[in-house]
Image: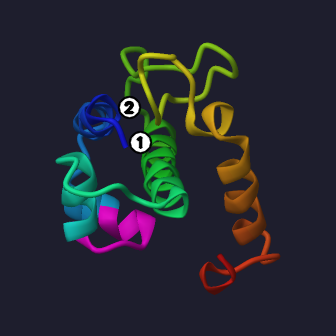
Amino acid sequence: MHLQQATELLRIRKTLRISAAALARRAGLDVKTIANVEQNRHRPRAFTLTLIWEGLRKEAERKRLAGADTSAWPRCTKCGDVLIADGQDCLCADCIDPAAAAIRRAVEVGEATRGDL
């Protein structure tokens, strides 16, 4: 993972005003994993990044439904979704990595589990 991407994930998490612990719970990861990714301590697997992006997306949706002002949130220039990926390209996780998006969807509908990956 590039330092810029790690910085972008941290910036988005702070923009959404979600703690690392809350993101870890939403993503189903350990809070140490979130810290390691954000601080670029190790290169995470695509599935780990997918879980983080999905956790951020879920929190963004929860906050939007609760009436949060989302106008300042970064958006994907391709699909308009909340930007949960590399801000340099202005694309969301699904638009940057369709394979990871397919994995996420397979897990969501029960066609795959973490153990399969």
Tag 2 near tag 1, CB within 8 Å: yes
Q: Reply yes or no: does residue 80 show up in magenta.
A: no
Tally the marks. Answer: 2
Q: Residues within 10 Å of mark 2 (few under 14, many from 20)?
A: few
Q: Residue 104 in the image: x percent, y percent?
A: 67, 59
Check disc 1 and report the residue beneath it.
63
User: Which residue lies at the image location 24% right of the left edge and 39% below the top edge?
Assistant: 10
Q: Which residues are the magenta region?
A: 24-31
Residue 95 lies in quadrant: top right
Please state which of residues 2 and 23 is positioned toward the viewer in this rendering. Answer: 2
Q: Which mark is residue 102?
A: none
Asked whether, in this view, residue 95 is left or right of residue 39, the answer is right
Amino acid at dot 2? Ala
SS under mark 2: loop
Magenta segment, prevailing SS (helix, strand or loop): helix
Check disc 2 and report the residue beneath it.
68
How far apart in space, not on screen, are marks 2 and 1 (Cα)? 5 Å
